[in-house]
Image (tube, rainbow, N blue to C red):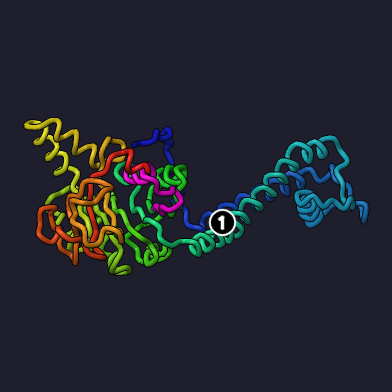
Amino acid sequence: MSQPRPPSTLKRRSGLPVWLSLAVRVGAVLGLVGLAIAVHWFDRTGLRDTYDNNVSFLDVVYFTMISISTTGYGDIAPVTERARMFDALVVTPIRVFVVLLFIGTAYNFVLKRTWDRWRMALIQRNLAGHIIVAGYGQTGSEAVDELIARGTPPDRFVVIDGDEHSIERAKACGATVLLGDATRDTLLEDVKIREASAMIVAAGRDDTSILITLSARHLNPTIPISVVVRNEDNEVPARAAGATTVINPVSFAGLLLATACTGPRVTDALVDLAGIGGEITLIERPVAAGEVGQPLSAIRTGLGLRLHRSGATLGFDAPEAAALQPGDTIVEIVTRRANVR
């Protein structure tokens, strides 16, 4: 069940490195201060020095700096209307701008980074059993929406994406987000992939998705990884990279189209089974203690279809399905009412 998407806004990350951004801010401050010093110097007759009645260039620099810094000792003061108007209409806005620029610089380069590191450390301490979603495009976001509809809390998702707009959408749905490249080991370690319960990879490009899968499998050999690939030739490389499940939406769409030609009601049933919004749906669960020893056909929660035991997939008519064992995994069809309960 898809949620309405907010209107798109064009955004572009600044290409300036940190040192250049800082240099631009310092240059802006020096330029404004230099402008004020120049005007005060050319109109120095409008200033009065109560100490020696002589306004030198150093006096002008001193007066300008203390005026912009709002100190104002009063030993040098504007006495003409022109000098006072310049201080009121030009120096005061410069003072406000410089103060805001210094505050903004301190926030961006010191406070914000410290705050972000503290928040990230706090979030990391509480990360366990979460689901990592690498890529929050159409496929990734719909997967998250479907899992939320099935009862997964939004704060259990950790979304990684390199697009700021996608990150904002993921944040709006309640997920923990991280802007960056999911192919990097350090970033996957930041989201504590070793403590994650599952991973969804939908990067939009098959080569990127396969590389993310390879990196994730290297860091966590046991995590279930579901990968979306669009080229049939890339299904084998995705599995070789460590994907637990490889999904090709093009092949699945072709299957539905082919089925619709001979059995449209079968197509409707397949769509219902794939999503939470239909009358029937597929679920996977471990065998319950009270079901051990019973046949798969005797389960009361739904209609048993498959049995997974020791890495083997067994149909409902297999001889092994006549007696469920501890550790078995059941795939069954349940109704919406049973699933809600």
Residue drawn at (43%, 64%), measured in percent from left and top?
Answer: 190
Front position in the image: 134 or 315: 315
Position of the C terminus, as image quadrant, is: top left
Q: Is residue 339 visible?
A: yes
- Does the magenta-highlighted stretch encompass residue 157? yes
Q: For this view, does 142 lie left or right of residue 55?
A: left
Give the quadrant of residue 184.
bottom left
Q: For this view, does 134 lie left or right of residue 61?
A: left
Residue position marked by numbered label 1 in the rendering:
22
- Does the magenta-highlighted stretch encompass residue 271? no
Give the quadrant of residue 227.
bottom left
Front position in the image: 11 or 254: 254
- At mark 1, the secondary structure is helix
Residue drawn at (67%, 45%), measured in percent from left and top?
Answer: 97
* Neighbours of disc 1 within 10 Å: few (<14), some (14-19), many (20+): some
Instruction: Name the spot of residue 214 as percent of width and height, x first.
Output: 25, 64
Q: For this view, does 52 lie left or right of residue 168?
A: right
Q: Look at label 1 and name its amino acid.
A: Leu
Give above or below for 24 relative to 334. below
Q: Which residues are magenta?
A: 143-159
Instruction: Name the spot of residue 157 as percent of width and height, x first.
Output: 41, 52
Tag count: 1
Residue drawn at (61%, 58%), measured in percent from left and top?
Answer: 111
Residue drawn at (56%, 62%), measured in percent from left and top?
Answer: 118
Front position in the image: 102 or 199: 199
Instruction: Name the spot of residue 132 as percent of width and height, x first.
Output: 37, 56
Q: Is residue 145 visible?
A: no
